[in-house]
Image: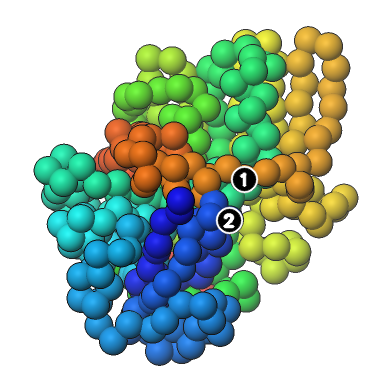
């Protein structure tokens, strides 16, 4: 037995990662709906098995649909997720799942009342073979206990995918830390097995894009739990000379060794993705993780059918979002608007 899913909202290409993960887990895509005409046409071409619904209510009122996946504009994700849960369905959205602590509080309340799943698809961990392999190694004790994570999430603003107008106004996505660093916060909690944490310090700035005064192109923060510390840096400053959208990296420091992940590229050496380097008490070695199995979709399908939390606990999902929102809220502004040259 599997689950039937629908896709709603196509404002970001993350919808394809979300749907493909669920399909790989055995889900059946039956319908879709949105207001983004061009993006919906592309989605229909990629997934001809899905029927276009006439209205959102047509999907919400369909009792045979178990889960709705969405990549609507970020500030619309929580209100949609609340409606989905109130209609007795589970929900999976692209990150960020919320743009304010108020939205998070409302979603938490509805989730507690309905006991439905509100999942945020932290794709940098869930869709990356090197990160999945690192989790396997860490859980097997390969580097001892992880006591610090250092994560970098650089992005290219132009030239990778089209950027809609909402990309440049943080009221729609909550700011650079909330938008991008939620990935690294998720990984800090996951790899250090932390169930609580605090934001020690955070900073944001707009250093290179004065034409977009309502966005930030740099952010960093420090986290601390009772088990570990973490440092995170995100930005929109990837230069054109890189052969991918961002040189995303993660460093895991353990008591018995360390792991470095070069997720998108091994610069000046290998343009492929999913590179893992490990140093332990026995050796230094490299692991190509291109063919590592990604279990997330299967786990979500299992959780929907069995009301379990094998893919991600609800507490973890909400905590990662909460820390991102707090870090964004308390961030020191380093340069609110640079001077036009």
Q: Nearer the viewer, residue 306 or 244?
A: 306
Q: Is residue 223 above or below residue 8?
A: above
Q: Nearer the viewer, residue 10 or 148?
A: 10
Mark 1 or 2, which is nearer the eye?
2
Image-based side of 330 in relation to 15, left or right: left
Write down the residue under mark 2: 24
Give the quarter of the image for residue 135.
top right
Write down the residue under mark 1: 294
Tell whether label 2 touches label 1 (CB within 8 Å): yes
Res 334 seen here: no
Mark 1–mark 2 Cα distance, whole angstroms, equals 9 Å
Looking at this view, name the residue that lies furthest to the front: 1
Image-based side of 230 in relation to 238, left or right: left
SS category of the residue bearing label 1: loop
Give the quarter of the image for residue 67.
bottom left
Q: Is residue 75 above or below residue 116?
A: below
Q: Earlier in the sequence, mark 1 or mark 2?
A: 2
The residue sitting at 71% across, 42% down in the picture is 292
- What is the number of the mark on residue 26? none
């Amino acid at each position: 037995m599997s689950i039937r899913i629908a896709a709603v909202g196509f404002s970001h290409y993350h919808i394809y990662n979300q749907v493909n993960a669920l399909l790989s887990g055995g889900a059946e895509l039956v319908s879709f709906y949105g207001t983004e005409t061009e993006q919906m046409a592309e989605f229909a071409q990629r997934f001809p098995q899905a029927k276009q619904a006439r209205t959102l209510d047509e999907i919400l009122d369909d009792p045979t649909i178990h889960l709705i996946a969405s990549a609507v504009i970020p500030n619309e994700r929580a209100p949609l997720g609340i409606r989905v849960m109130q209609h007795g369905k589970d929900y999976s959205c692209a990150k960020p799942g919320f743009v304010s602590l108020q939205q998070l509080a409302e979603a938490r309340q509805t989730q507690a009342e309905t006991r439905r799943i509100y999942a945020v698809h932290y794709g940098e961990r869930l869709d990356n073979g090197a990160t999945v392999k690192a989790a396997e190694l860490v859980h097997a004790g390969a580097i001892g206990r992880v006591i610090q994570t250092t994560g970098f999430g650089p992005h290219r603003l132009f030239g990778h995918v089209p950027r809609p107008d909402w990309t440049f106004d943080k009221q729609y996505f909550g700011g650079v830390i909330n938008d991008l660093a939620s990935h690294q916060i998720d990984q800090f909690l996951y790899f250090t097995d932390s169930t609580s944490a605090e934001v020690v310090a955070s900073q944001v700035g707009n250093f290179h894009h004065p034409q977009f005064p309502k966005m930030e192109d740099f952010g960093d923060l420090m986290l601390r739990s009772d088990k570990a510390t973490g440092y995170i840096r995100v930005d929109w400053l990837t230069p054109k000379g890189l052969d991918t959208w961002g040189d995303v990296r993660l460093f895991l420091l353990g008591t018995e060794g360390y792991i470095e992940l070069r997720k998108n590229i091994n610069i000046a050496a290998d343009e492929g993705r999913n590179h893992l380097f490990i140093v332990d008490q026995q050796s230094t070695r490299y692991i190509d993780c291109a063919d590592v199995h990604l279990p997330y979709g299967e786990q979500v399908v299992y959780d929907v059918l069995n009301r379990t939390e094998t893919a991600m606990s609800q507490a973890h999902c909400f905590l990662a979002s909460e820390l991102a929102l707090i870090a964004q809220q308390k961030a020191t502004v380093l340069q609110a608007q640079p001077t036009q040259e």
